[in-house]
Image: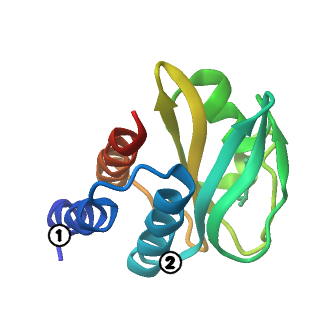
Amino acid sequence: MEKTEFYRSLLAQVDAIIGSETDVIANMANVSAILFNSLENVNWAGFYRMVDGQLVLGPFQGQVACIRIDVGRGVCGTAVSTGQVQCIIDVHQFPGHIACDAASNSEIVIPVYHRGDVIAVLDIDSTEYGNFDEHDVNGLQAIVERLQQSFN
Ligand code: SME
């Protein structure tokens, strides 16, 4: 299936599963399950939440992961400090990349906003180099926007 069509279908699934639910943790849990089970070559999908100025592990699917990440550190912390999506072709070339799972070779991190602040990040790891492109950036941003609407 073409990626644009794939993400349209994925967004419809996310929309249906969130429905009118407003609980952040529940919605993050279901979104991580949908992404982990639908995306190709993905070995980890989940959220880190901002708690007292630090990223703390949230709902996820995959292997156990590091619990706390400082803002500005690793791919996730960089997404928070810049407020920008990080689409990393080769994580081994990313200065300060935090290797939670040695099998990860590429990664995408999308900031989650609430009232203008980054309150979490969506982090997805892949075993393949360059697994994510601009279609994934756009598709995943649309999914994060739907998540944000649930609690904004
Ligand atoms: N690789 C991330 C850390 C989180 S794990 O991938 C789940 C980073 O560099 O921020």
Front in this rendered view, residue 24 or 128: 24
Rendered-image quadrant of the C terminus: top left
Circle nearer the N terminus (1, 2): 1
Amino acid at pointer 2: Asn
Residue occupying image coordinates x 60% and y 40%: 120
Determine whether, in the image, residue 58 is placed left or right of residue 20: right
Can residue 92 be seen here? The reply is yes
Residue 34: image x %, image y %? Answer: 41, 73
Secondary element type, mark 2: loop
Q: Is mark 1 within 8 Å of ligand 1?
A: no
Q: Which residue appears farthest toward the top when viewing the image?
A: 116
Do the residues under discs 1 and 2 have CB atoms within 8 angstroms? Answer: no
How crowded is the residue under tag 2: few (<14 C-alpha within 10 Å), some, or many (20+)? Answer: some
Q: Return the mark for residue 2.
A: 1
Residue occupying image coordinates x 18% and y 59%: 4
Residue 5: image x %, image y %? Answer: 14, 65
Q: Return the mark for residue 41.
A: 2
Amino acid at pointer 1: Glu
- How far apart, in angstroms, are the residues tagged by discs 1 and 2? 16 Å
Rendered-image quadrant of the N terminus: bottom left
